[in-house]
Amino acid sequence: MTDKKYTDEQEQIARFAKAMGHPARMAILQFLLRQETCFFGDIHEELPIAKATVSQHLKELKEAGLIQGEIEAPKVKYCINKENWALAQKMFAGFFGQQVCKKESCCG
């Protein structure tokens, strides 16, 4: 049995997708995208997310590289990681921009 390897791009887009795979994380990202500067404060006060779960969601987004900043109290500030955000945009656009199937008999 051969050990199949995934490409670096497949692994990276999967990390981004996994981090975005929860509605609370999507809400956090959308909230941060609307901010003019890094956000200082408790995000649970701004969004319908329980305080107990916010830090776990922030941790997941930070580990995937979609946000940056300090997420441990007392230093609490976060913002979108612009470099990785641009990379994610490019990767998802390329992935979803692929031709599905050119044959009429395919998939249907």
Image (cartoon, grey):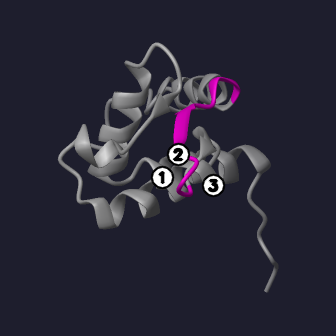
Is residue 85 visible in the rendered image? The answer is yes
Residue name at image x 63 percent, y 23 percent:
82
Cα distance between the residues tagged 3 and 1: 9 Å
User: Quadrant location of residue 3?
Assistant: bottom right
35 in relation to 25, above or below: above
Percent across and percent down for residue 27 are 30, 39
13 in relation to 30, above or below: below
Q: Say whether residue 74 is magenta.
A: yes
Nearest to the observer: residue 62 or residue 70: 70
Q: Which residue is mark 1?
A: 58
Nearest to the observer: residue 84 or residue 56: 56
Q: Say whether residue 59 is magenta.
A: no
Cα distance between the residues tagged 2 and 1: 11 Å
Q: Which residues are magenta?
A: 72-83
47 in relation to 99, above or below: below
Residue name at image x 43 percent, y 32 percent:
100
User: Quadrant location of residue 54?
Assistant: bottom left
Q: Which residue is mark 2?
A: 76
Q: Which residue is mark 3?
A: 63
Percent across and percent down for residue 11 are 68, 54
Residue name at image x 49 percent, y 48 percent:
17
What residue type is disc 2 on?
Answer: Val
Is residue 106 visible in the rendered image? The answer is no
- Mark drawn on residue 1: none
